Image (spheres, grey):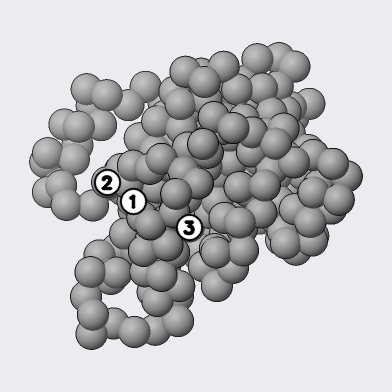
Amino acid sequence: MSNKTLGLESKLYQYFQDVSVREPDILKELRGETAKHPMSMMQIAPEQGQFMALLVQLMGAKKTLEVGVFTGYSALAVALALPDDGKIIACDINEEYTAIARNYWQKAGVDHKIDLRIAPALETLEKLIAEGQTNTFDFAFIDADKSNYDHYYEQALKLVRTGGLIAIDNVLWGGKVADQDIQDNRTQKIRNLNDKIYQDPRVNISLVPIADGLTLALKK
């Protein structure tokens, strides 16, 4: 995986950030702390956070879903873009990582917008479906274990409304998906989901080559 946009040499990537990324200080601070973490490569790129925030604003989203929180950068970026009565249901299993997230959400004054569910995401999503919350979410972001990507996609499709948007991270997987000599389980799972979404008549799609690749699937 990559936490910066693939395919841009360093000087051009720096220019790209200099003229386009308006990263709030609180996000910059969180990204700096996460950079010291041994799993820092799980952090999304700042340009991706800004892009998703813009999508949420364009949609006028109020109710969103996040599968995979890590230290909370993506949830914070989206929460800052939501109205004061907006809501994110955020799914993760790791108390240690999300403790960092909670701290920054509180510092940013958006913790009231984020409902963190510490449990396997498949269970949380199934519970939301069982509660009758299908077709009620405006936006969903999937960035968790790749082995369950297909399941997360199917559950998100049930939960987002018609005209709702699903964003799926790491779909270019550092370029590994294009190399047929690479056949490990995670790469194949992403490759298979990419093929499935390409052929899925339930959605309109665009794969945006930002950060590590972000698929956008608009529910018909």
Total marks placed? 3
Q: Position of residue 144 (x, y in %)?
A: 57, 59
Question: Tag 1, which secondary structure?
Answer: loop
The quarter of the picture where residue 54 lies is top left
Q: CA distance from mark 2 to mark 1?
A: 5 Å
**For the residues bearing labels 3 and 2, Cβ distance under 8 angstroms:** no
Q: Position of residue 217 (x, y in %)?
A: 45, 43
Tell me the residue that label 1 is attached to. 213
Q: Amino acid at mark 3?
A: Met
Q: Amino acid at mark 2?
A: Pro
What's the mark number on residue 42? 3
Residue at 61% from the left image edge and 63% from the top image edge = 151
Query: Along the line of sight, which residue is nearer the eye, 103 or 132?
Result: 132
User: Mark 3 or 2 closer to N-term?
Assistant: 3
Q: CA distance from mark 1 to mark 3?
A: 13 Å
Q: Amino acid at mark 1?
A: Gly
Residue at 54% from the left image edge and 29% from the top image edge = 163
Q: Quick check: 44 above or below 55?
A: below
Please state if 21 lies on the left or on the right of 164 as rendered: left
Residue at 23% from the left image edge and 26% from the top image edge = 18
Tell me the residue that label 2 is attached to. 209
The quarter of the picture where residue 178 lies is bottom left
User: Mark 1 or 3 closer to N-term?
Assistant: 3
Q: Quick check: 214 above or below 92?
A: above
